[in-house]
Amino acid sequence: MKSMKKCYSTKQDKISLNKIDELMRLVRHRRRSSAGMFYTSSAGAVTSLILCLMVSLAITGLGANSANATSVMSLTVSSDTVALNLAPTRATGTFGKSSNISITAKTTNATGYTLGVAAASATDYDKLKNGSDSIDSITEAVTEEAFKALNNTAYNGKWGYLPSKHNSAVNTDFLPAPKASGDILDVTTTANTTANEYSLAIGARVDSTTKMGAYSNTYNVILVNNAIPYTITYMDSIIGSMPTDVDSTSESETVYISGNTPTRSGYTFNGWCTVAPTRSTLTDTCSGTTYTQGQAHHIDGSSLTNDLTLYAMWKRNTMQNVSEWESTVGAGEETTAVDTRDGNVYSVARLCMSAATHTQPALNTCDRTMLWMTQNLDLKLGPAGSQTLTNADTDLNSVSSWTPGDTAKVPAVITNHATGSPSNSVTGWTNSNNKPYWAEGGDYYVYTSGNTNTDTIYNSMTACINGGHTEDQCRHYHVGNYYNWSAAVASNDTSSTTSDLTVMPNSICPKGWRLPNGLTGTNGNEIITEFNQLSLANNITAGITTKHDQSPGSGQWVNTGWTSTGFNNFRSTSTNPAGKQAPMYFVRSGSLDGTTLYDYGTLGLLWSSTSQYTTIAYYLDFHSGVFYPAGQYGRFDGFPVRCVAR
């Protein structure tokens, strides 16, 4: 009688090994060769047992950098099938053993390979099947002598496989069928360019109750490169907020740089460099290989040395590139940025604001936030004709450049900073409503200690620090420079700006920044000033200023006053009712009029962007017990400037 069984091994490029759970720490890319097709036939009551073998190379993934070497593996099997024809010759059962097939394996992987065999299916992995009939696997290892012993009928209708190695030890026993989770045959620890040789056979025992026919199942012979050791060390000589170093192994030749972003106050992370970068005041540069967060990195499987050291590179936050980093500053948080026009470093903070409205908004709520400078502007504008500010670095929107007119012949110099009383020693200043003038505030610091009549004045950074303050605090207390309104709005002639509530398009703020708005809108429907919006959200005042005196030059405005803790909230760092920090550091640096510096250390003033009349503009005014968010006064006065991000 003749029987025939086809053993298929479908030709394809990849084979899924997801069910081989514990075998060789599975890798990402796998290949296999075609196993072809096998036919067997025999006469008489013959049972044919066939193991169909699929050769599987579990190759570590190719690296992202093709210039680096990739380990090479080779796996060969002398036959796609292991076949045994067996007919029972005695009632107690007959044992048979197939011929050996040979398996060879080699790799250039420095840590060697793992060789295994696994069932192609998680179901019926232990059966050789012929339609509805099957021959079961043995359930534990058995020697050949015990398997074929005359009286061992317990093994009738059972089969097992015989690899020359099992778990890297020499093996002479028949073993149960490999499960889908796999059996380890051999694990090597070094590269071998000369192939290692193995053999594999099957054995079975049948009796007259076993139906004749061809019984088969399919198994994978799998070769995988062992994990490769590697390290990734993240370095920075400036800060410590680096990703965690990696000292590990990988089953793939592709690993990934940390996706975490290091942080450094005043800087934006600019990627990694394989050598120590060249540090710059603005942007670090790399002479080695650069990496970005999460980028793939190739490790060389043929080498045991895979150490990668990465150095953080930084891009200095500048006032002019605020759009690139402002979203990284959370509400109540503060950072620093460089003004590229002169190299001055400013502190800026994201501060809570109330809603912009014509009527009383909800108090003590953080309806929105804005990025504010928390220091007075310290930009020098002269001498006349020697400096041109451009639209690329300055808040010039209606013109491409601005050069202060020749009326500002020399910067005014303040030589006496007497607290509270007028100082009549200012030289070089001329009052003007329509020509730009500015004054050098000098190396002076005003410590605004609270809702008191006078502040503490320091005539140097050293004196400020010796007064019990940190360098960071003293930087906030710096008085900066003084500008008349024409200079503040970057105009050589503002006399044409006669209409009330006009917001000027230009300012001397850095590009991307502007002056805070004073009253805006229309008469009778004025929107509260941004100074007022800031004060309402941070519990500085509970009042609003939406009305103003319509008589040009009258100098009248509404006093909204302070809350009990308002002055301190406006001055320094405290938690507002919205739970946000408000590091404003507003200082009382007085005003400049003619040859006199008035109210130094007792009066705080800041220009807005809004005009009120030909010779009048809006500003912030605050001093002991008084808060005027929409003050109106002559444009000729010299006030400090704070800027907000556009």
Image (spheres, rainbow, N blue to C red):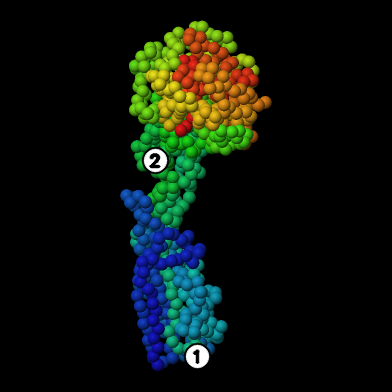
| Most foreground residue, 136 or 633 | 633
Give the residue displayed 47% in from the left and 80% down from the top: 128
Q: For mark 2, what is the residue?
A: 274
Determine whether label 1 and label 2 are within 8 Å by CB. no
Can residue 246 be seen at all in this image of the molecule? yes
In what element is the residue under mark 2? loop
Give the residue displayed 51% in from the left and 80% down from the top: 136
Residue type (three-letter) at the residue carrying disc 1: Ser
In what element is the residue under mark 1? loop
Where residue 329 sits: x, y (%)? 51, 36
Q: Residue furthest top?
A: 424
Q: Up-down: is 622 above or below 369? A: above
Q: State which tag comes first along the sequence, 1 or 2.
A: 1
Give the residue displayed 39% in from the left and 28% down from the top: 396
Can residue 466 be seen at all in this image of the molecule? no
Where residue 49 sits: x, y (%)? 43, 81
Residue type (three-letter) at the residue carrying disc 2: Thr
**Residue 353 falls left or right of residue 286:** right
| Most foreground residue, 513 or 440 | 513
Q: Up-down: is 430 above or below 74? A: above
Q: Quadrant of residue 317?
A: top left
- Screen quadrant of the N terminus: bottom left
Q: For mark 1, what is the residue?
A: 208
Where residue 105 sits: x, y (%)? 38, 64
Q: Residues within 10 Å of mark 2 (few under 14, many from 20)?
A: some
Nearer mark to the viewer, of 1 and 2: 2
Where residue 50 sits: x, y (%)? 42, 79
| Most foreground residue, 591 or 46 | 591
Separation (CA) of disc 1 from disc 2:
72 Å
